Image (spheres, coloured by chain):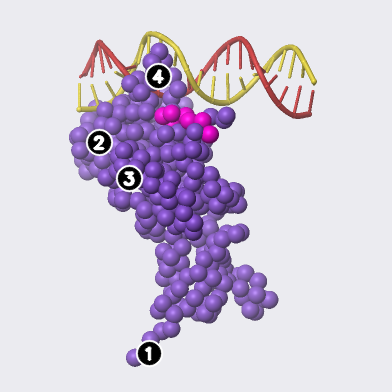
Chain colours: A purple, B red, C yellow
Amino acid sequence: MAVASSVRLRVILGEDSSQRVILRDGVPHSMSELLEEVQRQCNLPGSFRLQFRDPDFDHEFMNLTSPSDLQDKATVKVVFSPTTHVTLCQDGTPPPPYFGASHSTNFSPALSPSPSSSDTVILSTPPSTSGASSESSLESSSESASSLKSSQWPSVFDVPRFSYDSELKLQHANTAFKEGGTFLSPEPKLKSSILDGLAEEIVKYKLYPTDSDFEEVAKALIKKHPCLKEQGSVTGCSGWKVSLKYKLGNYRTKLRNVGCMEVTVNSLKHKPQGKSSPAYGVKKPRRAEVNYCPSFPSGETAESLERVRVNLLSEGKKKNNDQTLKVLMDKTFALRRHEVIHESPLIADFKTRWPALFRTKEVSECRCQNKYVWHNHKLNFV
DNA sequence: GGCAGGGCAGGCTTGGTAGT
DNA sequence: ACTACCAAGCCTGCCCTGCC
């Protein structure tokens, strides 16, 4: 029985970054297998295509459409899809999914890499829409909201399916609307179910949606369920927009009560003394700010991560220790974010606590790929 | 022309409460 | 339990003005 010999590829990941990929069973038969293997070995997020040096065209890079064009030691280049906005960690690698909050990475769930240094479990499905009011559901929503938001706000908001009975009612009402133009005035239970479903879909992306986000969701709702359109409203959905704002406001209160970090940071209890105004110093992601307030990795506490930080200090003194530093820096990302958000430390102090973050390698790898967003450490300048 | 600072209006926050 | 609403006050963006 013939054994396929392994094939080595040089994969160009960026301007100053390339990596060896070894295909132990030879070149895969399909492009999808090849892409998956490259993605796995290079730990790449999102969708991308490959280009290879085509000998028929003076070895210029051409799109790779068939794996059979590759030979041992071939050079391929990774070209990310325009829709993939990759957010890098300090070390230039994509963040593990638990980095969460409003981050601008658009991971493809089917192709997203496994969390390397994270112990956090990735939920592949949104929290139950039918049990939003239950404590357990809210806790999972809190988890979802604070640490598992792995998608950018969608270009087209997808209205989720509501509970079975709600969908049934809407189906009947939509039929009646199409036949006789009858609008539906949803009873409180149905309205609540709709708002619940929309809220849970929204918090998968943002805990603090903007006015235009609400408008977008409301429009998507009446587009999918035209029976819900409001008469006497210019847009046909102004009331839904307002209700959604109330819903999200109340929803954040619930999340606060179950300890969702991204909202508890704004509770009065966490405001400085003498500044106990609800609107004072609200901390939330601004513009492209990413991974705003991630939860600690599963099983970790501030104390345990502090011990990791101390370990980082000693590991940082060793030579040729990049891989260990990378792992430890990944692991302590949430702790750094918490320090930045809660304490707004001076750069000098922060540098003392986290010297590894200021290594040339850390900074240059982020800078050299200026299309990427380095997560914001909002520090006070000295 | 470009920049910085002040004033202003509107939007937004949390916490609390009334009504259903 | 939930939606809707209110209060108090901070934040943000816009506009205007003054200065270089």
Q: Is residue A10 left or right of residue A342?
A: right
Chain letter of disc 2?
A
Label 4: few (<14), some (14–19) or many (≥20) C-alpha neighbours in 10 Å: few
Q: Earlier in the sequence, mark 3 or mark 1?
A: 1
Task: Check disc 3 and give the amino acid type.
Answer: Pro
Label 1: few (<14), some (14–19) or many (≥20) C-alpha neighbours in 10 Å: few
Q: Is residue A228 left or right of residue A219?
A: left
Q: Of helix, strand and loop, which mostly describes the magenta segment? A: helix
Q: Which circle marks residue A297 in the picture?
A: 3
Q: Earlier in the sequence, mark 2 or mark 3?
A: 2
Chain letter of disc 4?
A
Rendered view: A49 above or below A281: below
Chain letter of disc 3?
A
- Asked if marks 2 and 3 fall on the same chain, the answer is yes
Q: Are marks 3 and 1 in contact (CB under 8 Å)?
A: no
Residue A60 visible, this orientation: yes
Q: Is residue A344 magenta?
A: yes
- Picture coordinates of residue A110, whole percent (x, y): 37, 58
Task: Quickly name the residue at label 2.
Answer: A138
Residue at 45% across / 71% down in the picture?
A34
Residue at 41% across / 15% down in the picture?
A275
Q: Earlier in the sequence, mark 4 or mark 1?
A: 1
State how far apart marks 3 and 1 are (Cα): 45 Å
Task: Quickly name the residue at label 1.
Answer: A2
State how far apart marks 4 and 2 are (Cα): 28 Å
